[in-house]
Image: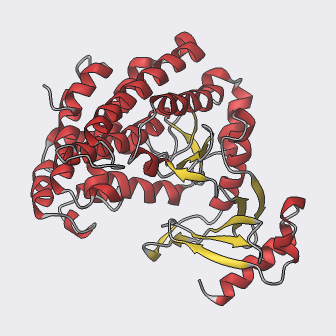
Amino acid sequence: MNEALATKIKTSVQQNLKDATLSSLTQDGDVQIEPISEGYLNEVCRLKSSDGCQSCIVKVYLNYVKLLGPDVPIESARCQREYEACNYFRSLLPNSTPLPYFCDPVNNIVCLEDLSGYRIWEDVLLESCDLHLGAKIADILVTLHSTSNMDNLSGEEFELLKNKFSPYPQQVAFLCDSHFVKPFLSNHRENKACDEMIRVKMDEIIQDEVVIKATELARECMSVGSGSCCIHGDLHVRSLMLSNVGEDMKMIDLECSRIGPPAFDVALLICNYVMLYHYHQELSHEDVGPGQADHSQLMADTLDIICITLSRYMEGMSRALKDKFDKHLVWRQILLLLGVEIIAWISGPANLNCLQPHPKGQLNCLNTALRILHKQSLSLDTKGLSRLIHNQH
């Protein structure tokens, strides 16, 4: 992080941070800045007092995609979206996000609670798989999607929500390009390094008429004017954090929040679960030593968490919205987006780091996606889906 940006961050915090419990961050002349490498869109850092007792997270929102450079523009007003989304989500689900301290729209900065006592959900799932926590995440989505749903609000209330969380065109264009275009182009080899057998399989996949139609429908589903409720918009296993003590789960990185299709949040999360399933499957043949993860058990538990998440979500939405919930439409959209997302994560710019060294596991993911997309028109329930994932036709 360059000195000019560090100075801008410190100045913004000194001027805008009003939380009395973090007074050292505004008064301490020796505040430390620790860059965090996670963000591919933004500059992210942790500010710590010189004694290490107080800290916060600061995100600086660029007007382009950090990973790709100035040639890929994106709205810097995402800072206000993240701040507003944190407050809105917390109004529906208390403590479901980091506490937002302030938004500085002049410098495109947001300051948030530091979740230093939390772990990334992906890291938890690499070692253990608590089905109760999986169900809890499904319940969180049910509350978010049903409470903000157009069928649960008056026309005026939903119009206000639409105005507050209307999608940003550049952001939507970037996300759709990353998820539904680049992974499926003939030059897909340029997206990232992959084993050649994955690229050969992708050469076949991008010619598959079912896949081509699915990507078209996915783009349409995620277009700017679509959607019936407020969604997280980027809900994968690295945008959830679990407390080290207890079962407190928080959603992070809310800048993609928008009015959109509820199926997308569910499909993206399940996509990552499917990838983790095939990761554990690849390692399940290894002997389990003292203190090592039992991948055979984790494979079975991951399949269970997929089924529990989907059944809990569909049942919860049906209870919340009753006959206004079109369960058949939402289920078809989940399957469609799930199949497309799995392919996109294997072929496109996105990564699930644990799976990268395992090309056979990646190939299994692609085959699972194809089975889902080719059978999505059938009356496929959660048990049927689990059989497809486990490669039982």
On screen, 58 above or below 305? Answer: below
Q: Nearer the viewer, residue 200 or 362?
A: 362
Residue 35 picture location, percent across and down? 59, 75
What colouring style does the render use?
Answer: secondary structure
Q: Quadrant of residue 215?
A: top left
Residue at (68, 50) in percent of width and height: 98
Q: Is residue 193 left or right of residue 243?
A: left
Residue at (15, 52) in percent of width and height: 360
Q: Quadrant of residue 231?
A: top right
Residue 45 picture location, percent across and down? 63, 71
Q: Nearer the viewer, residue 348 or 229?
A: 348
Q: Quadrant of residue 116?
A: bottom right
On screen, 371 above or below 63? Answer: above
Residue at (73, 30) in percent of width and height: 157
Q: Nearer the viewer, residue 17 or 117?
A: 117
Viewer can see residue 351: no
Quarter of the picture holding the N terminus: bottom right
Viewer can see residue 65: yes
Residue 47 picture location, percent across and down? 71, 72
Residue 208 picture location, percent across and down? 13, 44
On screen, 204 above or below 102? Answer: above
